[in-house]
Image: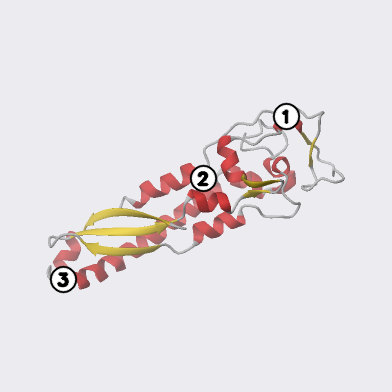
Amino acid sequence: MARGISVRVNRNVALKQVMTSNKGALARLLRNTIGPEIEEKQRELVLDFERHPVTLEIKGGNSASASSGVTSGYGNLFSFIGFEEGSRPTTNIKQILDEKIQFNIRSLSPDGLFKITMQIPTLEEVFSASPIPWAEGSSWAEGIEKGISNIGSYVYTNSRFSGSRSGSGLQSSNGAGAAFNTTPYMSKIIEDFKRNLKKFK
């Protein structure tokens, strides 16, 4: 479930346009000005996600270059994690980030101080929407930040592997011994979004 985040905004411009005593009109005016700002910040959130090196590498599929550096330049995340060939693992996360943000406005004082409460995407939602195909209950998005096992057994090839989910990666006792570099990912993206939400024009 989405988690609430609250900010406080003082709108002097709004106070000049309507009577201070008419809190309902003030709240409506504030909603009309704040709403587009929240939508713009949400678009920035989605762009941050889509432009992140991890997202780009996974979207590149089983033949992508290891541009994120998570697998030390060996193979790629798509084949290491073992996604089904042709699947689009990042789609579910993008859908969560795309969901319209609901917000409420409440007056705190007669001099124009309002509290805005927003329901934003949570890490729990993101992790639930990013399962590792072979590890029930585990999240690849969380694993990017905390580590995913078996990197030392990972074998990658540009040619097709028979029996490989991804088509280009296998787990083998003769693995390449590549290192897994944990990387700030969804936790940083969402924290940056929260900070951005607290900055209104």
Q: Residue at x 41, y 61 (%)?
A: 39
Q: Which residue is mark 2?
A: 186
Q: Which residue is mark 1?
A: 152
Amino acid on which disc 3 is placed: Val
Q: Secondary structure at mark 3?
A: loop
| Residue pictured at 36% horizontal, 59% vertical | 118
* Residue at the image position 31 percent from the left and 54 percent from the top: 6
Residue at figure coordinates x 85%, y 46% from the top left:
163
Q: Which amino acid type is shown beneath numbered disc 2?
A: Met
Q: Residue furthest front?
A: 137
Task: From the top left corner, tell me how far across and down residue 182 is, in percent.
Answer: 58, 33
| In the displayed structure image, the side of residue 162 where residue 49 appears, left or right | left
Give the alpha-carbon distance from disc 2 to disc 3, as whole Å: 41 Å
Q: Earlier in the sequence, mark 1 or mark 2?
A: 1
The x, y position of residue 160, in whole percent, is: 85, 44
Q: Which mark is residue 18?
A: 3
